[in-house]
Amino acid sequence: MDGWGFGLGIVGICLLWFIVKWLYFDPARREYRMWVRECLSRQAQKPNGTVNVTHGWPVLTIPYKTVNIELSLRENNDESALEYTYARFRTEVFNDKNFKAILDSKDLFQKPMIFGTRLAVLDEKFSEKYIVAGNDASFVNSLLTQEIRDRLLDESLQVAFGRHTDSSTLSRERGWLSVFTKGMRAKDEVLDGLIETAILFYQRLEALNKQRRVAG
């Protein structure tokens, strides 16, 4: 009987949790996602984008020249510190390159874990704020123009090039340029800044690719 009682108690606790979750947490989450969709829909009116739902979250897709820029928020139910808002696109150029420029932290417990070779960026102010790692220092320094570095610094944005930011470490897919900011932030000025910065990276990648073709 004790075993049955213990088992029924566990079932009751689980049932109570699901009821509370359904009554309180899920409606709040649905309401928040609806608000995010409204924010993205406003953004879609500017660049003629479209909003669709992917894995339960609204994603704005904006056509820009040869790529589609995706704009959305990444939720993490277990750790809010891992949530972020992003703009990203996939390009066919420089797929052999990868790098990250991540905001550093003076707090030992919040310091980012960066895998790969640390790179020196020829900008003291930028290097004080960011940890940069990648496989080609020359490429990274050519890509991170003064305009791009200033934009990242001014808006506390981070960037990754290579794999999809939320893909598994085993993924072989390359060519994703992601600009992102910490937290779930759907205000117009934040989304505008992400889109504009993603476009700056696209333009710079295209310019570098043109230089490479001319050089032969």
Image (tube, rainbow, N blue to C red):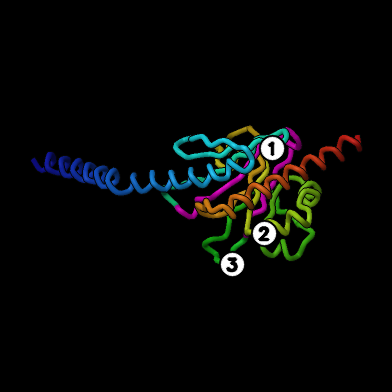
Labels in figure, total: 3
Q: Disc 3 or 2, which lies upstream in sequence?
A: 3
From the viewer's perspective, tell me whether residue 195 is left or right of residue 36.
right
**Mark 2 element type:** strand
Q: CA distance from mark 1 to mark 2?
A: 28 Å
**Which residue occupies the foreground of this view, 100 or 203?**
203
**Which residue occupies the foreground of this view, 185 or 135?**
185
What range is drawn magenta here?
80-103
* Amino acid marked by disc 2: Tyr
Q: Residues within 10 Å of mark 3 (few under 14, many from 20)?
A: few
Q: Disc 1 or 3, which lies upstream in sequence?
A: 1
The residue that appears at 49% across and 55% down in the rendered structure is 81
The residue that appears at 90% across and 36% down in the rendered structure is 214
**Which residue occupies the foreground of this view, 54 or 62?**
62
Q: In the image, which disc is placed on residue 116? A: none
* Amino acid marked by disc 3: Lys
Is residue 198 inside the magenta stretch? no
From the viewer's perspective, tell me whether residue 193 is left or right of residue 2.
right
- On the question of residue 14 being in view, the answer is yes
Residue 36 in percent (x, y) is at: 48, 46
Q: CA distance from mark 1 to mark 3?
A: 37 Å
Tell which tag, 1 or 2, sits nearer the viewer. 1
State yes or no: discs 3 and 2 in contact (Cβ < 8 Å). Answer: no
Q: Disc 1 or 2, which lies upstream in sequence?
A: 1
Residue that badge 1 annotates? 64
Residue 57 in percent (x, y) is at: 47, 40
Q: In the image, which disc is placed on residue 130? A: 2
Residue 200 in percent (x, y) is at: 73, 47
The residue that appears at 63% across and 42% down in the rendered structure is 88
Question: Quarter holding the N terminus?
Answer: top left
